[in-house]
Amino acid sequence: MTLRSPLRSYNPEQLLVTALSVAFVAYIVIRSRFVAMTIDEVATIFNHATRGVWDMVTYQKDATPNNHVFHTLCLNFTTWFLGIHQVTARIPVLLGGILYLWAARRISGMHDRAEMRLFTLFVLLGNHFVIEFFSLARGYGLASACMLASICGVLQYLRTPTQKALMGSAFMAFLAVWSNFTLLNFYLPYTVLMLLVVAQQQSGGSLFRHWALVAAGTGLTALVTVKPVLAMRAADEFRFWQSSGFLDDTLRPFVRAALSEPLLEYVPWLMALVVVFCTVAWAYAMGVWIKKYARFDGFTFVSALFLGAICYNLLQNAILGVPFLDARTSLFFYPLLALLLMSAAHWIWEKKPLAARTYMVIVAGFVVVNFYQKANFTRQTEWWFDNGTFMVIEYLEQLYYAEKRTAPITLDTSWPMQNSYNFHIKDSTPRLDNHIQLPPWHSGREYPRDTEFYVSEGYEDIEKLKDQYELVLTAPYNPIYLFQRKKAQ
């Protein structure tokens, strides 16, 4: 009997997509284990996920927007059921990463050409800054995943306008907002556009039934957001300060966060390229939409949604004075940009296939090279000062055993780093406070310090501590410094 290799039943595209999917999931899972917990993740676990369900949902006692409601509810369950550990705390966002991958594969599979399918998958999965949030216990990654799944439902509805596709899209859009209220920037233009899409796809009784589904989703979203938003407003959690503008407050920080170190000098050029590309793409999409007698297809819908989200953000700032989004709160803009890149490839292919192939190779090549340069298993971009936690703990653990100590090593940290060290030494499993002892939480302490070791993210501490301490360890890639008290002469 001749044995047949199972690989023969797969074509090269299927093998590549499967390998990419497995690598994506493995990457975010490994990062969830080896990236240290950050200041805001720890605050989410202990300040928000430990509260009662009603309080989590309504912000009754604490209006701090760190509580990304749906994510916090999931986090409450996983830590209660599996215990407090960095991986168990990150299970909800890991599942969000898998949902994001599923939606990306479904959207890419809607194309007829293999080149377009692979290009779509590469650009959706290739932004490392976005991918980082599928390994961090915050609501940003989960919200972006639900948003992409909602858009996937819209694209399916435009192909086959079934009630099931509409319900799935509306529900995922609701979960996106519930995961992070920043996604209201996406949800409001999404709702308006969905009413228009339903009107073009349905008539008679079906029209009103499908409109009712959109209205039900909007009503549910309003129901769960109105009380928390009012609580945040009453607590002055919407900060009314001077804004520099969308380009400087949102686009520039996001582009910087998404780029690897060698490419940072090109930030202004890439910003200009993004602005020019989007402007041309939106103008072309408007022309296509008009030629089709104001009927949406998948590509014009994505274009209108992206533009609508940005316009809403601008209006929100102009009317309410709400500051523009920063790098992490603007994550949801990237999948919309990626889908616009996909749409442009489709439009170019209709005119000049060779030009479309050239365009896709250039864009996908840039994405792959940047991802390769930025990829790592130990660091994250947004809370950079927590990247050295494991390195410092490992150094002190080795010192404890090498010197055969019996008393814990005393360690203090600058205040932004305390949450991470407290979690990994005092709160997670296994605990390390028999070997390393931390002082009670503090917002600031005077020099000189009174512990044997002190870790800081500030270079200025080298000068301030030089008389009593010496520098013994510097974390690579980030300015993180470990000092040890000098021994008496």
Image (spheres, rainbow, N blue to C red):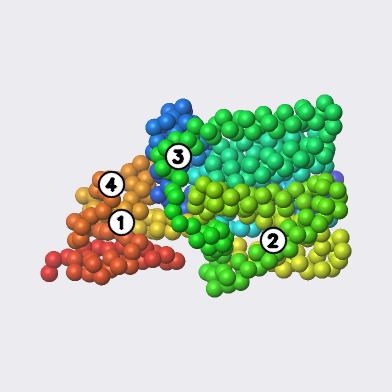
Residue on which disc 4 sits = 441
Q: Which mark is residue 414?
A: 1
State the residue position of label 2.
278
Front-most of residues 65 and 476:
65
**Secondary structure at numbered mark 4:** loop
Q: Position of residue 204 (x, y in %)?
A: 85, 28
Q: Which quarter of the figure has residue 484?
A: bottom left
**Three-letter code for the amino acid on which mark 1 is drawn:** Ser
Q: Nearer the viewer, mark 1 or mark 3?
A: 3
Image x and y of residue 451, in percent: 21, 56
Distance between mark 2 and mark 3 Cα atoms: 33 Å
| Callout 1–callout 4 Cβ contact below 8 Å | no
Q: Give the residue type at disc 2.
A: Cys
Above or below, 201 relative to 373: above
Residue shown at 38%/50% (left/top)? 420
Please state if 437 lies on the left or on the right of 105 as rendered: left
Residue at (76, 67) in percent of width and height:
359
Q: CA distance from mark 1 to mark 4?
A: 10 Å
User: Upstream in the sequence, badge 4 or badge 3?
Assistant: 3
Give the amino acid type for the residue marked by disc 3 in the picture: Arg
Disc ID at residue 150: none
